[in-house]
Amino acid sequence: MPAPLMVLVAIVSIQAGSALAVQLFSELGALGTVAWRLVLAALILLAISRPRLDLTDRLAVRTVLVFGLAIAAMNALFYLAIARVPLGVVVAIEFLGPLGLAAFTAKRWRERAWVGLALTGVVLVTPWAGTGYDLLGMVFAALAGAGWASFVLLSTRVGALHPGNHGIALGMAVAALVLSPMAILSVPALVTQPGALVTLLAVALLSTAIPFSLEFHALKRISA
């Protein structure tokens, strides 16, 4: 699959998963939902890639830990945001992170023109109608955007240190461990709503395992 197509499929997949995830907030809460999403995605990726980490390689270990923390923060902040502000608005604000990264790394006027065109398109299609959007929710969205830009930059570094899917699997495992207390706290709600586990599995695949893997591999072949 061409790298740009990987990115496009990842974009569609992660938003479809986010739309599903919102339905679980009433039972599991935003943090409980994202915690289970990361735990299930980590288990899937670990089972598929079976990564190995040389604990004597301090650089590799440190990079994976920072990568995992970035994944945990980005996802938790995004879910906290969509619990307070409509998904379309949150995505538009979050997109400023990678868009800002593109603008910062642009070297030619033509690249900057494309960034400006993308920004114009985002503003035009965003459902800004309505008043009283939660300010804290919008702050969470902006911070999630910064986390997304960090994920893009760190993916390139992690991909150079770890072969195949190993880097994303290890990073996802760290993120899952960081948020595992929230998953444990939501176990009683999950027991009373066993059907939610099926939705969680779909969310884990659509919002995490598939798009993060595709972006991770795309970043090995195209620039951040």
Image (tube, helix red, strand yellow):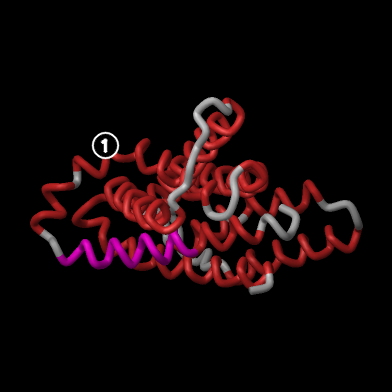
Can residue 130 be seen in the rendering of this structure? yes
What residue is rendered at 42% in x and 66% in y?
Answer: 206
Q: Position of residue 221 (x, y in %)?
A: 72, 60
Mark 1 sits on what residue?
181
Q: Position of residue 168 (x, y in %)?
A: 51, 49
Report the amino acid beneath label 1: Pro
Q: Quadrant of residue 217?
A: bottom right
Q: Quadrant of residue 24?
A: bottom left
Can residue 137 be seen in the rendering of this structure? no
Q: Is residue 76 above or below residue 124?
A: above
Secondary-structure class at tag 1: helix
Q: Which residues are magenta?
A: 195-210
Front residue of this view, candidates 161 and 223: 161
Dominant SS of magenta comes to helix
What residue is rendered at 63% in x and 74% in y?
Answer: 1
Q: Quadrant of residue 82?
A: bottom left
Front residue of this view, candidates 61 and 113: 61
